[in-house]
Amino acid sequence: MPQTKPEPAPAHHLDQRSFRDLLGRFPTGVVLVTAEAAHGPVGMAVNSFVSVSLEPALIALCVGRSSTTWPSLRATGGFAVSILGDGHAELCRLFATQGADRFSGGTWVRTPAGRPTLPDALGWLDCDISAIHPAGDHDLVVASVDRGAVTESSRPLVFHAGRFRGLAG
């Protein structure tokens, strides 16, 4: 009996909500991006974070142009990245809330460049902004990595289909 190939789901033009729902099926890790601005520490949660190059060491992230935090972060010229573990869901929600006092009540340490980072993050990176490229309603930020460390070995915080989830195993 001949094998038949399954048909893909029918394609249709994607409106913004459908596009967002479709991309939400791709699980992502979550990081905090933080810096020390003239008026104090600033930071935001980011799930569009990726490694770009090993030589030189580069990362990239995408930031919505509507972000009220991004202008302050951008003005510092660099930032720390804290890779979040599965115990950081509430902190991540706080950093995703506009107008929240994001640095209250937590324990923070400083990177060699003086940027705030979490002592219990899975790891951290000290980054300097190398390039910013307009990309639709976002900025694509490429940054060089100066220093970093692995600090914990717990499971990562994962975002999938609009929710934080844990990894099995």
Image (cartoon, helix red, strand yellow):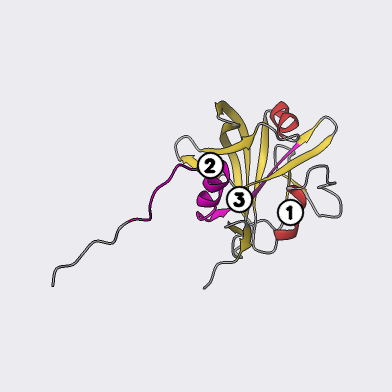
Where in the figure is residue 24, as x and y percent of width and height?
Answer: 55, 53
Left or right: where 122 falls relative to 1: right
Label 2's element? loop
Mark 3 and mark 1 lie on one chain; the one further toward the N terminus is 1
Q: List the residue tagged with mark 3.
A: 149
In the image, residue 105 lies in the stretch drawn in magenta: no
Q: Which residues are magenta?
A: 8-35
Q: Which residue type carries mark 2?
A: Asp
For label 1, the crowd category at 10 Å Cα-Cα, with few meaning under 14, some 14 to 19 and many 20 or more, is: some
Q: Which mark is residue 69?
A: none
Mark 1 and mark 2 lie on one chain; the one further toward the N terminus is 2
Front label number (2 vs 3): 2
For label 3, the crowd category at 10 Å Cα-Cα, with few meaning under 14, some 14 to 19 and many 20 or more, is: few
Q: Which residue type carries mark 3?
A: Ala
Where in the figure is residue 66, as x and y percent of width and height?
Answer: 70, 33
Front label number (1 vs 2): 2
Q: Which image quadrant for residue 7?
A: bottom left
Front label number (3 vs 1): 1
Q: Which image quadrant for residue 8?
A: bottom left
Where in the figure is residue 88, as x and y percent of width and height?
Answer: 70, 59
Q: List the residue tagged with mark 2.
A: 15
Residue shown at 57% from the left, 57% from the top: 161
Q: Which residue type carries mark 1?
A: Arg
Q: List the residue tagged with mark 1.
A: 93
Label 3's element? strand
Mark 2 and mark 3 lie on one chain; the one further toward the N terminus is 2
